[in-house]
Amino acid sequence: MTAFFAGLGVRPGFRTGEEIVFNKRRDAEQLHPKTNAVVPPKYLVPVDGAPDPGEGLGRRDALAEWLTSPNNPYFAPAIANRVWSYFMGRGIIDPVDDIRASNQPVNAELLNALTADLIENDFDLRLLMRTIATSRAYQSSFQTNEWNQDDRINFSHHEPRRLSAEQLADAVARATGSRFEIDTLPEDFDATALPDPHVMTASMGIEGFLDLFGKPDRETACECERKTEMSLPQALSLLNGSVIADAIADPEGRVATLVLSGRDNEELIAELYLAALGRLPTGGEAELAGEPHRGGPGPDVGPAQLERLSLQLVSSISQPQRSLRPCS
């Protein structure tokens, strides 16, 4: 496979640690390190219709055509499995970067059906996503029953999972009504749409927040580069970090707007729940949330009380299971 890239070179970039890949020459050859013989490019497995890398197309163009061919036995299943994992939290073959003979799919028929659907629709990822999103498996509840409560691999029910770093940043922005400043990008630009992992932010606060919660540098194609484990620094950042605190205290944010809205306590609490969790509070949650600032309509509720409730709700966004207690 190295021979496909024989014409490429690497040189230092303009920034520290940056590397620039460039074309040295089109007719360069890969030489065997011991015999110095020319090593011709060769596909890992033969595929019907794959172009000859030595004729017509450039070698890397030929490799790309072979790689994405419908006849390639590895490409379509790998894509289908990866997209499925983004929706379901785990792949049919899991980990998704560990496809091998000794790591069999938990449901081969399902993977084959998704693969066939992907190939039939000319690798249309939107149609594949629609197929998955409209499936019974994806639309199943988080609630379990006596038959599937111990199941973790067969997709009989949804598994709660944490938000990614970018998703969490966007969720915090929407819950608090505050926007993070990102240089050179529009104000309404989302963290999930950042075009480059090294985009610098105005305050650098959100940059450190994303790194802390596992945003990868995207230096490899492995999903393992993204860290999903919870850590003590993450918990401290959610409870008393400057990114969350500044977003909640934003003078143009949601809490400041609610304080001046003149709405009663019940409406204020409902608004914060809807913004953070996408649902209304249960009776018990509303009662607990209302205890620290009972006794009057909206104007009597100060920003400090609403900020504490907002902090509690926003801090719970990153957790798969949310159990709220009254603020003190």
Image (cartoon, rainbow, N blue to C red):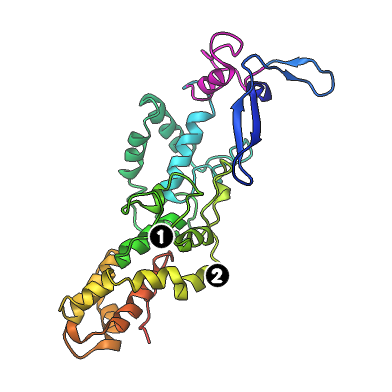
Quadrant of the rendered image containing residue 80: top left
Quadrant of the rendered image containing residue 206: bottom left
Which residue position is annotated with label 2?
233
- Which sits earlier in the primary sequence, circle 2 or circle 1? 1
Q: Is residue 66 left or right of residue 38?
A: left
Looking at numbered disc 2 in the image, what kind of residue is underneath it?
Pro
Image x and y of residue 124, in percent: 36, 30
Q: Is residue 136 left or right of residue 25?
A: left
Check the picture and name the quadrant holding the C terminus: bottom left
Callout 2: SS: helix
Residue closest to the eye, 200 or 283? 200
In percent of the image, x 28 and y 66: which residue is there? Answer: 275
Check the picture and name the quadrant holding the N terminus: top right
Q: Is residue 326 visible in the rendered structure shown here?
A: yes
Callout 1: SS: helix
Q: Is residue 191 magenta?
A: no
Magenta-drawn stretch, dominant element (helix, strand or loop): loop
In percent of the image, x 36 and y 42: which residue is there? Answer: 132
Image x and y of residue 66, in percent: 53, 20
**What residue range appears in magenta?**
41-69
Looking at numbered disc 1 in the image, what kind of residue is underneath it?
Ala
Which residue position is annotated with label 1?
169
Q: In the rendered view, would you say 23 is above or below 263?
A: above
In percent of the image, x 39 and y 74: which residue is there? Answer: 323
Residue closest to the eye, 142 or 270? 270
Q: Residue furthest top?
A: 55
Image x and y of residue 10, in percent: 65, 32
**Badge number at residue 72:** none
Quadrant of the rendered image containing residue 250: bottom left
